[in-house]
Amino acid sequence: MSSIMEELLAESTFEKLLEGSIIKGTITEIKQHEVIVDFGGKAEGAVPSSEFMDIGELQVGSEIEVFLEKLEDKNGNPILSYDKAEQKKNWENILNTCEEGSIIPGRVKSKVKGGLIVSIGVDSFLPASQIDITPSKNLDQYVGQTYDFKVVKINQDRKNIVVSRRELIEEQRQNKRRELLADVKPGDSRKGVVKNITDYGAFIDLDGLDGLLHITDMSWGRISHPSEILKQGEEINVMIIEVDRDRERVSLGLKQLESNPWDRIDEKYPIGTKIHGKVVNLVPYGAFIELEEGVEGLVHVTELSWTKRISKPSEMLRIGEEVDAVVIGIQKEEQKISLGIRQLDVNPWDMARHNYPSGARVRGKVRNLTSYGAFIELEEGIDGMVHVSDMSWTRKVNHPSEVLKKNDEIDAIVLDVDSDNQRISLGMKQLLEDPWDDIEAYFKIGDVVTGEVSKITSYGAFVGLKNDIDGLIHISQISENRIEKVKDAINVDQEVEARVIKIDRDDRRIGLSIKACSYSQDQLAAETAAYDSLNSGGDLTSLGDILDEATR
């Protein structure tokens, strides 16, 4: 009879157990992965041990409340949840005590897609974007940690709560930012953490206040990118340079914590000092030499060598090379030092006046031709220049290529030496006597001469005579008949016979006539007079002018 009563009683109790309700039970066994609870059902239920914050605090025989999800699953076993019971019990309490915007402590339970589950008495969702100010790639590091959270959204119908940790951090930083802005002043030294690195500088977190450390304020020396001296997350000391409280901006400096090496630069590197440094940069106009951190000097390309013809510094130097140099100038305010490498050696031009006195005969190779003359290499690094006007006594040389070609070995006379400007003037014609000094020994009026036509102009034709002297056959002296164009009657390289009808020593000009070859002395005298009259009337230009307009 008693056993029947017990069964009836059990069935009566079982029928009172409602799925979806919170019931009381007694812990009968504590295992590694589950806790066994007797709740008065047909069978005991198992609760996963992971639902308890600390399973070590549980004791066999203790009474706990659990949530009855199912009286029997397909295997006839009940499904219980301690966590859901707590959630259900706490939900109403949360609604009564918590509202959107309130601050509440919570523990991160697990990682889910898109964020974290945080227990604040009930489960709430913490989006990944709301975990911290900077996105975190590793969410596992937060699981098990306890923080304060701000409730940003409560959905009663769906029983869903969204929380944020980032908003709290930002509010805290904002408060710290205001405090720091009110407190800091230029010249202060502060600790900070490198938050972000850009091409133009780095942003430093001063515990809530971000400041910009520009690349120009990182080092007194040369740096190409901030990453050369800083790395993200590094803690550094910086100096406050400028504070803009209205815009909440702070400018920072790193190099200002050290003395400026340029302050006493003229005392440390007086002009004439020999220095040793490293080549740090090469540019088309010279090389920058680092003397010490923050101090560089420029060796201009013209100061690299006395004798070598250097068009760019890379012909002589390379980056990273250590070299000696001499200080030749200081501009302290502009933070510039001029250096010279050639000053380490004796200047060969100092001996040029002694080695190449005026009137001396020298020999050298034609190194270069220009429109106005030829450069003759006398020794390595020392050239002399023969101007076109000093190439011939008798010919007007329009371009040196008419007389010389590159690499020719020639003799010349030193005309002048300018050591200061590193110039030596040479002459070729000075090797010979000027035939015009005794022109009558070569040509007389009335002489019949032969020569080859070298140039044709609108005025006449030039004929090469002996001793490299040119004569001019004016267009009026070619034929008895009127000639419109010289080239219609005479060709270049044609050999002609003509008569000397004019010798002008002052203008260094000889007038020739083809038509006068058969003239009598009286006719010749008359033609000479007519020729003189033509010249004095201005119809006949000077030899130089005509040569300038020469056309073939």
Image (spheres, rainbow, N blue to C red):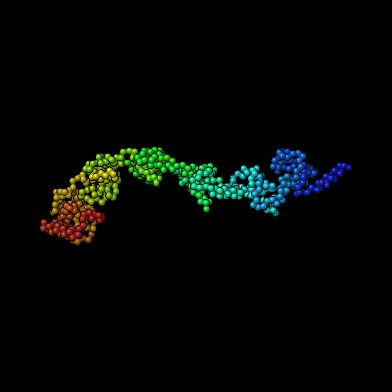
Residue 218: image x %, image y %?
47, 44
Q: Which residue does the image show at 16% across and 48% down from the upper left? A: 437
Q: How many marks?
A: 0
Q: Of residues 399 and 99, which is closer to you in this image?
A: 99
Q: Which residue does the image show at 47% across and 44% down from the upper left? A: 256
> In the rendered view, does 227 fall on the left or right side of 13?
left
Residue 359: image x %, image y %?
21, 43
Quarter the N terminus occupies: top right
Quarter the C terminus occupies: bottom left
> In the rendered view, does 405 fall on the left or right side of 290?
left
Outermost residue to the right: 1
Displayed quadrant of residue 516: bottom left
Residue 319: image x %, image y %?
41, 41
> In the rendered view, does 79 fall on the left or right side of 248?
right
Residue 543: image x %, image y %?
21, 54
Q: Of residues 244 and 285, which is closer to you in this image?
A: 244
Q: Is residue 62 something one can see in this rendering?
A: yes
> In the rendered view, does 73 fall on the left or right side of 331?
right
In the rendered view, tell whether residue 61 sits above or below residue 399. Answer: above
Q: Of residues 264 and 443, which is closer to you in this image?
A: 264
Displayed quadrant of residue 407: top left
Q: Is residue 376 something one can see in this rendering?
A: no
Q: Which residue does the image show at 45% across and 42% down from the upper left? A: 259
Q: Of residues 311 and 473, which is closer to you in this image?
A: 311
